[in-house]
Amino acid sequence: METQLPYPPARPRSLFMRLNASRRLVRGLLSLAIGCLAMFVCPAFCSQAWCQETVADEETSQIDLLIEDADARDFHVPESLTMRLRILALDPFEPTQIQYKYGGWGSPGERIYGHFWKPDPPPVAQAKPAEVDLDDLLDSPTTAKKPAGDKPLTDSLKRPEIANPQGRKYVEKPPLFQLREWTEQTPLSNFVTGGATAPRFLQVFGGDGGEIVGQTDTGERNFVGAARNFQVEFEFYYQGKLLKQFVIHAPDAPIAPLVIPYHELTGTVEPTDPAFLDNLVPLETYVRRRADMAEAQPWSAGPKPTLFAMVSNLGGYAPTHRLGSRHADPAIVTQEARILRAMGINGFQGAPGFFVRQAMRQEGAAAPFHRADDDHAPGYPVPRWTSAASPPNSGCPYAPGVEAAKQAAAVEAVAGMRAKSGFDMIYDVTVDEIGSVYDMTEEGKAHMGTCPHCRRGFQEYVQSMGLTAADFGAADISQVTPLVVSRKGAAPQGEVSKGDAMRAYWTLRFNCHASAQLFAPMRAAARAENANKRQAVDQGDTTSATARQPWMYPGAMRGNTFLMGGHSLDFFNWYRTADNAFVYETSNRDPRVWSWDSYLCDVGRTVIAQPDMGQELFAVYVKPHRGAPMQRALSAVSRGARYINWYTYGPSYAKGDMWGHRPEIMAQVAQTNRLIAAAEEVLYDSKWSQPARIAVVKPRASELWMTLSGGAPVWTASWENAKWVYAALTHAHLPVDPIDQVMIRDQDLSQYRVIYLNGPALERAAAQKLADWVAGGGVLVTMGYGLSRDEYNQPLEFLQPVLGLSKRTEPEMWHSTRTYGATSLQTYDDASRLGERPTPATASVKSAGTDGAEATGFELTVGREVLHPAAGTEVLSRYGDGGVAATRHPHGQGEVIVLGYFAGLEYAVPLMHDRFDMQRDFDPLRRRAVVAPAVARAQPVVDASEPTIEGVLLKNTTTGKQAITLMNWAYGVTAVRVIQSEQSRQERPVVSHLPARNVKVVVRGAGAVQRVRSLALEQTFAVEPGSDGESFQFTLHELREGDILLLE
């Protein structure tokens, strides 16, 4: 119930997005020559694929555009703006404290909480209240003690403190309220500090919050005993006059949530203004209005995915007032589900149990969400060591009893997934952003070298790899033990013998194996269940329990560490042992590297296709608020992903690191889902129409020696170089397969014409296989000290004749290269310089052409190896001082090309500044230095006129229908945002997406095609056949973030 006193009629305003002109004045300079003010900007709810932050025309915008912001803290809450409240109903009722909380417990902001008081001054407290922890505080009717580390109670809510003889202070006992007994008038300023740029969500609670008793049949915590039918009346006053009143009814637990729009009280806006008053509402009203608004948006119309799983979270509800509960009203859940459904979401993560059960039965508002459920399986089946608890054998993967625990975890995981029959599929997360099992021990990774159980496990492991005691220089295998390494995996300093180098390498390999093998029984159990279901379905069975149970995909959720500084758990070897799902989350924040997600998606595509891996699900957690949501999702589905978790919707009152409060992102998610839905009969269960002819390798041996070296400059530069080699190849529109050294060693490489080996170290067996492959006609490309060392960091001398080099010398490193860490790319400046600045002649390459063509050359930044060609080796380019920079050497029917510099990194250097433009800064000459060997031997399948446009040609494995996905990864700095306050002035670049115009697309190998239909532009385009008889071309007048083209 909501009652509002007579005031001027409310102006229509969006709850989604608002910009108060008195708070944020937006000004721009359209040109330095003109030097005049441009216009004011008021972002509205976006119905296009992208909400630009700037207003300049994309054809003429310059970075001299300035956007000035007033201080976001510029808001005021009058002390005369107050509220009081009373409990109207509570079942069962007992006199109770009335408390409040805001923030923390998984939602944004500090944890703020406290008590309401009676109007009459309470008596002075004389006794010390009992000491309790925070959980007890939220349920206790007797204490107001607050633990250290949280926000103190504000003065008007905190009663006088009494000092005892020892000088300690205690807060008096809060009062107990009867039904219909009013609290005192409390200023609303007590509930907010700092800036307010969005509504604040306050929860008022009292009575018995119940307790946790085990779990429900669907796996969530089982709260029992909470009071119900909680009704609270609120009254709001300004300058002593009643402004507004409403009643909040919480049927399932005694917690009443409301929304206070502090952010509207800016400039001259008073509490009587409809901007504030209309939006001071119960949470259910706020969410219902959001749902109405979402369903009214253009992006809510159109198809919604039914085959692809599109999942997001739905938090906030719990039948308690404890901890992270934000409300206990099923009606709010229903309204939030309307918003999710408007965006095309068809599955859950963390939804309330009652709503999950409705989805399983396909009932009511939950019915459309039965496609998938994102749940939790048992994690590592070993106890964790903490400073407070140290169970025996904590974290040890080979301790007695672990084998039985592994099997028990598999049984538990399968039973939990089977209990959710009614969902089509279950992704069961074992460990979120998984790390090594040894991180659960007291010693960390050093545990491997000190634990007798793990020593025996290590010995069995190296023997399974074909190694003997003699290989380690030992007389007996019992003498072969893991090297004691630090928590980060760095090796001991100083000279390291070959035997110790072997132990170090295999210790880090063992770390991954020891962790992965703990999940092998769970993977086997899930695959067996899926095989039984598949057999039942193939036989036409639709009613048996086996046929109706969900597809089961347990597995770890991986961070995208492959794209950052690496990880102790390899992205290839892990899946040779563990998991039935390849899953990672997108976390990179720098727009210049968002396209790297295609690299990791290509890893996923390669992994799920391998017979010794064969994960049955490829899924990606796309964080749309981290940028490029459409491109990242299209990249994933273009590589076999069937499950997208849009992580995390929120809601904003329940979850941190969320996006549900940002309308422009909601529009992007909805439009992406709508695009995919319109094409999913082609895209779902599709594969690349043409196999990749180029492979890239970032060897595990190089990654481990980067770790063991402590991040030495040549190793980190090589690691980052590999990512930009991939980027350069995709900018040349060449399909690429990432493979690892095991695949090189054990598999047929004949499909590949060119292999790029990016790293100094490679296992000898794989190096020999590469040499044989080159002799059979392949082209091998390496650079930046590549292929100089083996897996034990010993010289790969036998490979030098294959490379066409007489010797190898350590590179000269001019800058240290920082491995990417999810935030921003480094800039090569004086802070990263190593030693003296090189001379211009030293730091340049005269000819970048690796096919003998003349080129003007370019300056180098990172470092170089001066090559020493052997007889019969062709010199392709030289440094400015005459040293050899690139060579080509024939070997058998193939050849090897060696670049002495880090050509991938040098390709990226012009982009590494704070005014970047990805349509401008990628130099074709530098790109040619990387891709020329590949371009000479392979053709693009989808070739676009802009390098930053990626295209994939897909063919449905059942129907043969084809589609093209296009992703435009171009971003640039289009303005500078000036944040001005009385104390400071800050300038921040504004990054915007850069649409492409008049995009020419050439497609090869698709067969006879008459026209293509653009789902984003909603237009059909005729195609022009190519002169080669195997290709066709067409032109799109515009490509924004992405598009799907259906071939007809």
Image: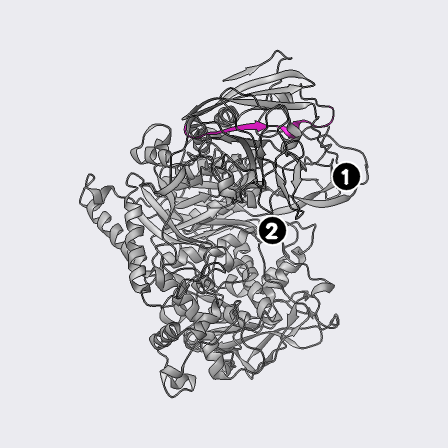
Examine the rendered structure and indicate whether residue 129 appears above or below residue 293.
Answer: below
Decide if residue 154 is on the left or right side of residue 369: right
Quadrant (top left/top right/bottom left/bottom right) for the C terminus: top left
Name, please, the residue furthest toward the top: 6
Please tell me which residue lies in front, 803 or 472: 472
- Which range of residues does the magenta coloring cover? 252-268
Q: Secondary structure at mark 1?
A: loop
Residue type at mark 2? Asp
Tell me the CA gap for discs 1 and 2.
Answer: 27 Å
Which badge, 1 or 2, is on the more N-terminal residue?
A: 2
Q: How many marks?
A: 2
- Residues at circles 1 and 2 in contact by the CB criterion of under 8 Å: no
Measuring from the top left, give residue 542's x and y in whole percent: 21, 39
> Quadrant of the rendered structure where residue 175 is?
top right
Task: Give the percent coordinates (x, y) of residue 52.
Answer: 62, 37
Q: Is residue 257 magenta?
A: yes
Q: Is residue 161 visible?
A: yes
Q: Secondary structure at mark 2?
A: loop
Q: Is residue 622 magenta?
A: no
* Display colour scheme: one colour
Decide: is 365 above or below 112.
above
The residue at which mark 1 appears reads as: 981
Is 644 placed above or below 228 here? below
Q: Which quadrant of the figure has residue 851?
A: bottom right
Kind of residue sitting beneath label 1: Ser
Residue 403 placed where, x, y %?
A: 30, 64
Residue carrying label 2 = 590
Inspect this view and state whether residue 1010 appears.
no
Residue shown at the point (71%, 26%) measured from the top left: 78
- Horizontal placement of 14 versus 369: left or right? right
Q: Nearer the viewer, mark 1 or mark 2?
A: 1
Mark 1 surroundings within 10 Å by alpha-carbon count, few (fewer than 14), some (14 through 19), many (20 or more) = some
